[in-house]
Image: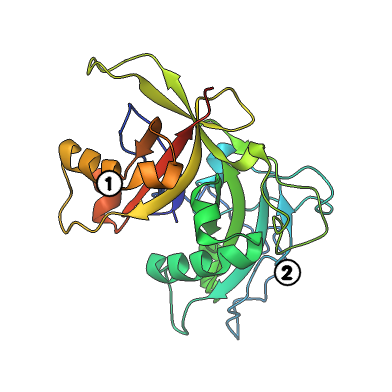
């Protein structure tokens, strides 16, 4: 979901919403072989260990925003997932034998594929939520020890922070009973900051003041990146049906997201009486 981590930006009416991940960050200078992430790493000699320093599925973490966008993470898990946390490891995958550096296409495919099972949500519910995945790779020392694992973590990411996840012993199917408003996408009108005569849209969760609530999505089928008029034409053909109202808001991918394969357009239903 995510070139690495999900970032959204609700702009003006019918403005673009980036539904892709940001580029991975710096390694963060970690040097410990174990990295406090799981079982101790095996010595680099004589045998290489593909799980050197690997994390454990079901572990929960308390991460800062900067830590969540780093390529590696050496935080210790919290004692258990009943403690406050904003990140949960739901999958640990392996790069093929002989791999000495990360392969984002494999990471993206595996982390994305397993996200519905981890959350208990459908693809549509995930698109309408702030839930997404972030990933981490081994440290330099772990790579040298033979590590070739990668870690997929569930996060709830808003424009300014990481939301706390539910406190639970479960490691999968966390939202099978549905989403509360603190995890659902909404839009609040803001001032016109770019001078185009349209109010800006502020991306918020639905537990905050808002005027539009996510109602559904559709996929744009154009081969090349549409201009604004074309996006509006597409929205006019789909959003009234999806929202069942004449007052709605639409967001679409930025060009960088489109070029990376994102075609999702989201329709938001007016919540005003």
Q: Quadrant of the C terminus?
A: top right
Residue 245 location in percent, x, y?
43, 36
Residue ID for mark 2 = 40
- Looking at the rendered image, the quarter that the N terminus falls into is bottom left
Residue drawn 65% across and 37% down? 182
Residue at position x 23%, y 14% from top? 195
| Relative height, residue 52 to residue 214 (above, below) | below
| Figure check: 52 above or below 167 | below
Pointer 2: residues within 10 angstroms few (<14), some, or many (20+)? some
Q: Report the front residue among 116 and 46.
A: 116
Residue at 23% x, 42% y is 231
Say left or right for 217 vs 44: left
Instruction: Name the image colouring.
Output: rainbow
What is the x, y in percent for residue 176? 70, 59
Residue 147 appearing in the image: no
In the picture, the disc for residue 237 is 1
Residue depicted at 52% across the width and 65% down the height: 111
Residue 46, by quadrant, is bottom right
Q: Secondary structure at mark 2?
A: loop
Gap between marks 1 and 2 measured at Cα: 56 Å
């Amino acid at each position: 979901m995510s070139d690495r981590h999900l970032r959204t930006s609700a702009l003006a009416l019918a403005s673009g919403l980036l539904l892709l991940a940001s580029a991975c960050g710096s390694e963060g200078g970690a040097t410990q072989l174990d990295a406090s992430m799981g079982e101790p790493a095996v010595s680099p000699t004589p045998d290489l260990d593909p799980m050197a320093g690997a994390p454990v599925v079901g572990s929960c973490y308390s991460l800062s925003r900067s830590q969540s966008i780093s390529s590696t993470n050496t935080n210790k898990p919290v004692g258990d997932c009943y403690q406050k946390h904003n990140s949960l490891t739901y999958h640990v995958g392996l790069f093929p034998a002989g791999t000495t550096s990360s392969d984002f296409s494999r990471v993206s495919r595996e982390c994305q594929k397993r996200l519905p099972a981890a959350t208990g949500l459908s693809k549509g519910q995930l698109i309408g939520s702030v839930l997404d995945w972030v990933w981490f790779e081994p440290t330099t020392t772990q790579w040298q020890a033979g590590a070739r694992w990668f870690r997929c973590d569930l996060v709830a990411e808003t424009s300014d922070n990481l939301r706390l996840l539910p406190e639970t012993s479960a490691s999968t199917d966390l939202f099978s009973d549905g989403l509360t408003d603190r995890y659902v996408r909404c839009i609040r009108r803001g001032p016109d900051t770019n001078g185009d005569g349209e109010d800006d849209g502020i991306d918020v969760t639905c537990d905050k003041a808002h005027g539009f609530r996510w109602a559904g999505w559709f996929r744009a089928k154009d081969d090349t990146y549409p201009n604004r008029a074309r996006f509006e034409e597409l929205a006019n053909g789909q959003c009234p049906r999806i929202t069942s109202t004449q007052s709605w808001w639409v967001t679409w991918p930025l060009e960088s997201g489109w070029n990376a394969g994102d075609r999702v357009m989201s329709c938001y239903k007016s919540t005003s009486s």
